[in-house]
Amino acid sequence: MGKVKKKVKVIRIDTDKCNGCRACEMICSAFHASDKYSVINPSRSRIRMIREPMRDVYLPVYAGEYTAAECMGRDKYVVDGKEYEECAFCRASCPSRDAFKEPDSGLPLKCDMCEDDPEQEEPLCVKWCLADALTYEEREEEVEEEVILEEMETGLKSLIDKYGLDDLIDSIARMSRKE
Ligand code: SF4
Ligand code: SF4
C-alpha cells in the first residue's frame, strides 16, 4: 500500500480568550440532536467546558477517540500558574469519567467537525464562539493508506454498534441508488 493525502481538521483553542459562556456546548448539542436543533443539552455536546471561575480556569476540550480502558499514567499540568486536573487535556471518551458519553445510552461521543450536507463553512462551535477562543484549521498530510483503512473500519464498527449491520447495509444501498 502506498501513501495517500489526508485532510486533517483541527480546532485550535486559546484558553486565555475563553470566558466560559458555554455557547459551544449548546450549539454542538443542538446540532447533533436527532431532530436537528430540537434540543439543547450540554451533556450531549462533543465539546465540554472545564469551568472553575474561582480559579479563572476555562478550558474547552472537544471529544477525540473512544478508549475501552483507562490509561495508567496521569499528569498534572501547570500553565501560566494555573493547575489543571489530571485528565483535563485528554480528549478520549474513557471509562474513568462521564465526559463525552451519550447520557442515555452511554455510547461514546466523538467530534465529527460538524460534517454535514451541504458542508458547513466552519464547525459550529467555532462559529458561535464570539470570544474567538476557537479557531478552525485544515491541512493536508501524507499518510499510509493502511491508516485510512483502519480509521474507516473503526468508523464502520461504531455505526454497526449503533444502528445494526442490516440498517447500515440498507442505508448504503439506498445511498448508492441515489448516486
Ligand atoms: S463558546 Fe468560546 S468562550 Fe464560550 S465557552 Fe465555548 S470556547 Fe469558551
Ligand atoms: S466541531 Fe462540531 S461536533 Fe465538534 S465539538 Fe464543535 S460543534 Fe461539536
Image: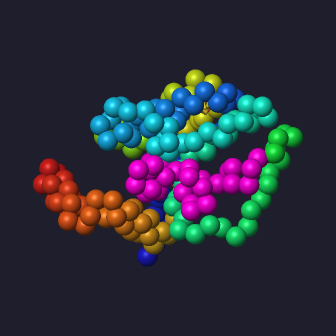
**Residue visible at 36% across and 39% down in the picture:** 33
**Residue visible at 24% across and 61% down in the picture:** 168
Q: Which residue is most to the left? A: 177
As rendered, which of 5 and 149 lies closer to the eye? 149
In the image, residue 132 sits, relative to residue 139, either above or below, namely: above
Q: Which quadrant would residue 132 be assigned to in this image?
A: top right
In the image, residue 149 sits, relative to residue 28, either above or below, namely: below
What predominant SS class does the magenta segment belong to? loop
Image x and y of residue 96, in percent: 61, 60
In the image, residue 82 sits, relative to residue 168, either above or below, namely: above
Q: Is residue 173 visible?
A: yes
Q: Which quadrant would residue 39 be assigned to in this image?
A: top left
Q: Which quadrant would residue 18 be assigned to in this image?
A: top right
In the image, residue 168 sits, relative to residue 52, either above or below, namely: below
Q: Is residue 87 magenta?
A: yes
Image x and y of residue 89, in percent: 68, 51
Image x and y of residue 16, in percent: 74, 32
**Residue visible at 87% across and 40% down in the picture:** 81
